[in-house]
Image: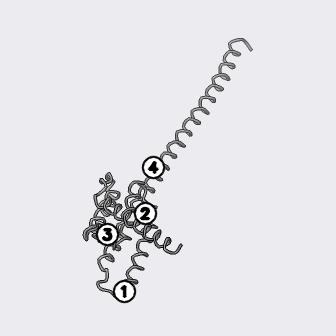
Amino acid sequence: MDASAWVAAVSGLIGAGIGGIASIKAAAYAQRGQIQAMQIQMQTGADLRSRDKSEAAADEAIRQLHVIKQHYWTHPRGDDQRSLSSWNERLRKQIAQMGLITPRLRDAKLRKRVEQIVEALAYYRELRDPSLDGYPSLAYELFRHGLDCLGTAVRHEPLPDEHQAVRDAASIIAEYNARMEEEARSYEEGYH
């Protein structure tokens, strides 16, 4: 074999080797690109599922807050302790149900606001007590603000500013708890 045949054979082998390596690298890059695209697609799908779950939790919270609101307005009038006890028990159960829903709300600020509102609604007597600076429409304002906040979650809008009713309810609850602690302290001192 002469030199030109050897050069041609070696060139062919080198070309085939380089072509094979380039082909393998191209396949690896393409596969890596496909994997990244699949990961992005899976992440997007997970984000959508998470968003759907958050919206579903907000919808469920809206429904439950409406249930509590409807029950709230059926507060028994008069001194019938049996119906008042039954009403209180149903309110506690409905608030507990809301407590199971709120942790599923995705937005931490929304979750905290709804928890504040629901906690305040448990103090239904104190919210109306004028000696604690309560007023009859406070509960209505809390319901309305809670529904506004949950509606923003469904519509993907920013959370509205905290309503004055939330601050009023927080101060009423703080004052009530301070009075109860003082009363308990004076009660204990009476026995010692």
Residue density around tag 1, few if under 14, some if 14–19, many if 20 or more, within 10 Å: some
Residue at the location (45% across, 70% down)?
Answer: 186
Q: CA distance from mark 4 to mark 1?
A: 51 Å
Amino acid type, residue under disc 2 in the picture: Thr
Amino acid type, residue under disc 4 in the picture: Thr
Choose top left, top right, bottom left or bottom right for residue 78.
bottom left
Q: Which mark is residue 127?
A: 3
Along the line of sight, the residue nearer the viewer: 106 or 177: 177
Q: CA distance from mark 4 to mark 2?
A: 24 Å
Residue at the location (43% across, 70% down)?
Answer: 183
Q: CA distance from mark 3 to mark 1?
A: 20 Å
- Position above or below: 95 against 19: below
**Tag 1 or tag 3, which sits nearer the N-term?**
1
Amino acid type, residue under disc 1 in the picture: Ser
Colour option used: one colour
Please tell me whether mark 4 or mark 1 is closer to you in this view: 1
**Residue 97: where, in percent of width, then height?**
44, 71
Q: Which mark is residue 83?
A: 1
* Circle 3/circle 1 CB separation < 8 Å: no
Can residue 59 be seen from the camera position used here? Answer: no
